[in-house]
Image: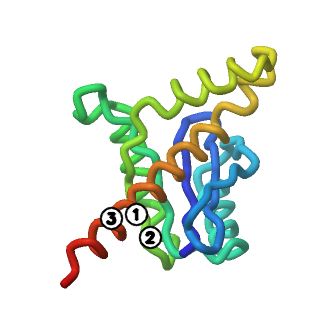
Amino acid sequence: MRVLAIDFGMKRMGLAVSDALGITAQGLRTLQRTRLDDDLEKIRQLTEEYATERVLVGNPLGHGGGETAMSRKAAEFAEKLRRRLTCPVQLWDERLTSVEANRALRETGLTLGKRQQAVDRVAATLLLQGYLDYLSNERSRDARSAP
């Protein structure tokens, strides 16, 4: 099952897609936000191009897990995507993915400018890989508990 992940932002959205087996995540080009309709159409086109069966929208919850102003905007965006796409759209906790992405990019020695260009894509990749790992763990647990 292929999954498309979106690291939601007001100026840019990081994008990542899983491989056909749903094991690994690969970053795609960052989407520079323009008009909402154009953004939604670009994501719809990507779901067709990659034959995705699910779209994850990063949900930037607060540190305690509570809703934030940005998580409300992400939920509104996800709802608009649901109306446009034929596959399920799911919010997924993305707490600390941008922090993790910045740390990982800092460790590579990239300049600040290059890190800023890559951070959204890396955050989307981390978001998606976390989701894929979660699914894999759930399948393993189900297999162990089956009679």
13 lies above or below 37: above
In which quadrant will I find the C terminus? Answer: bottom left
Would you call the spot at circle 2 few (<14 residues within 10 Å), some (14-19), or many (20 or more)? few
Q: Is residue 125 above or below residue 96?
A: below
Rendered-image quadrant of the N terminus: bottom right
Q: Secondary structure at mark 3?
A: helix
Picture coordinates of residue 127 (x, y %)? 50, 46
Q: Quadrant of residue 114?
A: top right
Q: Nearer the viewer, mark 2 or mark 3?
A: 3
On the image, the x and y values in percent for residue 141 come to 28, 66
Residue type pointed to by label 2: Arg
Residue type at tag 3: Glu
Residue denoted by label 2:
83
* Drawn side of residue 32 relative to residue 114, left or right: left
Assess whether mark 3 and mark 1 are in contact (beta carbons under 8 angstroms).
Answer: yes
Q: Earlier in the sequence, mark 1 or mark 2?
A: 2
Instruction: From this view, report whether residue 42 is shown above or below residue 9.
Output: below
